[in-house]
Image: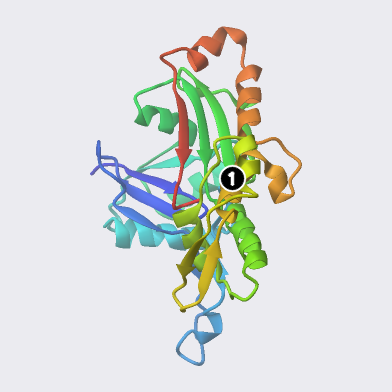
């Protein structure tokens, strides 16, 4: 039986068997609903609004929920049989604390009785996926951004950068801006997520963004409940916030400056591997998932 590969993100969990050129066979939301055992009403109505996020900003925060999620994925989703568990590969977010990694190993061996375990850093796996062992990865996810130089299959941790800006922050930003320009519309965050995925754009540069703020074509969108919302320059703020985090109220550099600083921190003798014509700058952006 092939090993199982699991990529547990803040928004989605992706899992499947390690078969070349095959997409994950299971992609499900990581968020779960907390069900109270012995609900006297018998319909779980008391827990319908209690949602649990096992993974927050890339790291496991609720281990009980994570155990339940993995149990569903491995046995119900991928068809493992109790007593006949196989091997598993976990993708490891950048700068994962040692204690979290040890707790995951303990969970997998003691609870799931797996026959083998390996965790590989996401930056390295991203480069492997395009046939490279050296390059610089920029991983933009739902809850964080990781920038990692990789040299000969090893992450250069001293030069790596992690900052907690992700799709969830961009969704809230879009909700705030649409709320200001459409005060009559009652927006749900689930609707804002879909609007972000459909309409968000990125200006060519900072000068173009400044022009767009004062002259941008507007579009109307009909929400599922029949409300009509107008979208204009708000769509560009979502992308620009990655380059100008001040839009989110954060005092930090954008991804371009972070990337330049990351590469410049690496020893100059390795710059050729990161910047030469055969190197790879791998932008792993989960469009629709961030």
User: Which class describes the residues within 10 Å of circle 1: few (<14), some (14-19), or many (20+)?
Assistant: many
Give the residue drawn at x 60%, y 20%.
263
Q: Quadrant of residue 127?
A: top left
User: Outermost residue toward the front?
Assistant: 215
Number of numbered discs overlaid on the protein picture: 1
Pointer 1 residue = 144
| Image position of 153 with respect to 163: above or below | above
Give the residue drawn at x 70%, y 35%.
253
User: Outermost residue toward the right?
Assistant: 251
Determine the secondary structure under disc 1: loop
Decide which of 110, 64 is in the foreground and name it. 64
| Image position of 265 with respect to 89: above or below | above
Give the residue drawn at x 67%, y 40%.
244
Q: Is residue 221 left or right of residue 83?
A: right
Residue 86: x and y, percent?
31, 46
Residue 55: x and y, percent?
54, 54
Give the residue drawn at x 34%, y 24%.
131
Quarter in which the N terminus is drawn: top left
Q: Is residue 90 left or right of residue 174?
A: left
Residue 135: x and y, percent?
48, 22
Residue 123: x and y, percent?
48, 32
**Res 218 seen here:** yes
**Res 57 seen here:** no
Decide which of 41, 229 is in the foreground and name it. 229
| Image position of 191 with respect to 127: above or below | below
Q: Quadrant of residue 222?
A: bottom left
Decide which of 275, 62 is in the foreground and name it. 275
């Amino acid at each position: 039986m092939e090993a199982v590969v699991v990529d547990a993100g803040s928004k989605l969990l992706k899992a499947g068997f390690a078969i070349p050129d095959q997409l994950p066979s299971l992609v499900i939301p990581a968020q779960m609903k907390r069900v109270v055992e012995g609900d006297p009403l018998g319909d779980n109505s008391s827990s319908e609004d209690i949602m649990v996020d096992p993974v927050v900003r890339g790291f496991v925060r609720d281990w009980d929920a994570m155990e339940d999620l993995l149990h569903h994925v491995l046995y119900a989703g991928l068809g493992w049989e109790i007593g006949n568990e196989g091997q598993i590969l976990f993708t490891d977010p950048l700068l994962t604390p040692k204690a979290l990694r040890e707790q995951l190993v303990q969970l997998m061996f003691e609870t799931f009785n797996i026959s083998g375990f390996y965790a590989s850093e996401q930056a390295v796996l991203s480069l492997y996926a395009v046939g490279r062992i050296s390059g610089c990865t920029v991983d933009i996810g739902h809850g964080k951004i990781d920038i990692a130089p990789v040299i000969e299959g090893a992450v250069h941790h001293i030069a790596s950068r992690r900052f907690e800006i992700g799709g969830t922050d961009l969704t809230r930003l879009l909700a705030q801006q649409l709320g200001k320009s459409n005060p009559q519309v009652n927006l749900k965050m689930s609707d804002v997520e879909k609007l972000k995925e459909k309409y968000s754009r990125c200006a060519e540069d900072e000068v173009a963004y400044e022009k767009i703020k004062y002259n941008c074509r507007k579009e109307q969108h009909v929400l599922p409940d029949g409300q009509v919302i107008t979208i204009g320059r708000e769509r560009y703020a979502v992308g620009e916030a990655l380059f100008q985090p001040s839009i989110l109220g954060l005092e930090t550099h954008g991804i371009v400056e972070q990337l330049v600083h990351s590469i410049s921190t690496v020893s100059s003798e390795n710059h050729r591997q990161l910047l030469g014509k055969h190197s790879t700058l791998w932008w792993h952006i989960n469009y629709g998932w961030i």
